[in-house]
Image (spheres, grey):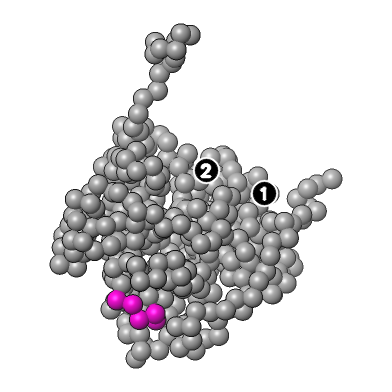
């Protein structure tokens, strides 16, 4: 028997969804259901990051890297709403697109298979599309769940554009394919992080942070957090560190997302008034300098919280410079909540870079039969 063809499911639970009270001013109707994929609420911990403590900031971490295992990270929250919509549309397959080590593509592929939907992923690679991409990191999970993997070059991806490439591929599929954009970052997916703001209110109450900081890769997480904070009326400053595109591209996307959700510009204002976006691309998307890699492993060794080099690690590295350069905004004694968006599954794909940068702490050596180091 072919186990993939039989489309087994885990019978994941669909539940009714009630939107936060403060979101009722949005004129586009909210989702009415979600699929329970994430282990929520994710914990909030005091986090002793030395560089932030030296600036007098009280740092906390929201562990959205702990939403799950094979379906995990910030994408998990978005997929709860997106895949509920796919089921409502009686989809037979799910198609999405991203980089060759996309956390979003891996989570989408695994969750789709668990729901009995056929997963397809289009992956942008720096290698020839005819070269087998292997099984490292996220790719291994996608291939193990029997996803159909289609490879494209970076040049072709940039020439055609992700939306057109996705639409062209979907048009070739039989049945009822359901399309999910890069990062799950569309208005429906954004509800995952509007809801996370409500989750933080329930968790923290009056201890809601002065600042919330996160990486920004496709814009959906930043859009949900910042718009949610704005609608809730809280004075919290939301800061996003862009790890790929320019702040202008992100602002344009978030502006369009807020409009599609039915946010009244006269009420909420422009995104540039309720979200600070800083360019943290550095060498480029999924590319890290030796300094960034050494910082990431230093924080991991000092605190036990492992950061990835593509999103959260690069975001925290750059945010420290932003905070140091703006002491009147990020003031001593204030609280900073950093959202760890996951990405650990892709770490194995960065092993050579970490080793070359001499960024791996600790030591490895053989043990003698008597128990001492040789």
**In which image quadrant can residue 110 be found?**
bottom right
What main secondary structure does the magenta stretch of the protein show? loop
Q: Residue furthest bottom?
A: 266
Figure quadrant of the N terminus: top right
Which residue is at a point 39% across and 45% down the rendered structure image? 305
Magenta-tinted stretch:
231-235
Tell whether position 20 is magenta.
Answer: no
At which x and y percent is residue 330? 21, 64
**In which image quadrant can residue 324 be found?**
bottom left
At which x and y percent is residue 356? 34, 32
Q: Which residue is mark 2?
A: 137
Which residue is at a point 43% across and 15% down the rendered structure image? 366
Q: Residue furthest front?
A: 206
Q: Residue furthest top?
A: 370
Which residue is at a point 35% across and 81% down the rendered structure image? 233
Q: Is residue 23 above or below residue 248?
A: below
Q: Nearer the viewer, residue 169 or 247?
A: 247
4 left or right of 324 in image? right
């Amino acid at each position: 028997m072919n186990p993939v063809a039989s489309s087994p499911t885990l019978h994941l639970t669909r539940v009714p969804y009630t939107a936060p009270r403060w979101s009722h001013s949005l004129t586009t109707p909210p989702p009415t259901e979600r699929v329970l994929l994430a282990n929520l609420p994710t914990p909030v911990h005091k986090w002793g990051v030395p560089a932030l403590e030296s600036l007098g900031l009280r740092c906390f971490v929201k562990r959205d890297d702990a939403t799950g295992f094979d379906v995990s990270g910030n994408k998990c929250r978005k997929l709860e709403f997106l895949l509920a919509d796919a089921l409502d549309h009686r989809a037979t397959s799910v198609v999405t697109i991203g980089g060759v080590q996309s956390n979003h593509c891996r989570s989408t592929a695994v969750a789709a298979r668990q729901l009995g939907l056929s997963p397809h992923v289009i992956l942008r690679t720096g290698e020839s599309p005819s070269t087998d991409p292997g099984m490292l990191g996220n790719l291994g999970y996608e291939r193990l769940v029997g996803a159909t993997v289609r490879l494209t070059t970076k040049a072709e991806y940039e020439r055609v554009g992700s939306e057109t490439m996705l639409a062209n591929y979907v048009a070739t599929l039989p049945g009822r394919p359901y399309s999910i954009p890069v990062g799950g970052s569309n208005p429906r997916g954004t509800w995952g992080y509007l809801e996370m703001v409500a989750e933080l209110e329930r968790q923290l109450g009056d201890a809601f942070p002065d600042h919330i900081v996160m990486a920004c890769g496709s814009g959906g997480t930043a859009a949900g957090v910042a718009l949610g904070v704005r609608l809730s009326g809280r004075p919290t400053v939301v800061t996003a560190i862009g790890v790929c595109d320019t702040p202008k591209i992100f602002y344009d996307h978030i502006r369009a997302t807020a409009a599609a959700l039915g946010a009244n510009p006269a009420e909420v204002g422009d995104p540039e008034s309720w979200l600070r976006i800083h360019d943290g691309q550095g060498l480029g998307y999924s590319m890290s300098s030796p300094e960034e890699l050494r910082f990431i492993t230093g924080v991991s060794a000092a605190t036990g919280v492992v950061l990835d080099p593509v999103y959260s690690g690069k975001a925290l590295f750059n945010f420290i410079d932003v905070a140091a350069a703006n002491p009147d905004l990020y003031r001593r004694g204030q609280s900073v909540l950093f959202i760890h968006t996951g990405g650990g599954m892709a770490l194995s794909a960065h092993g050579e870079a970490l080793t070359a940068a001499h960024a791996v702490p600790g030591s490895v050596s053989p043990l003698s039969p008597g128990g001492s180091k040789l």
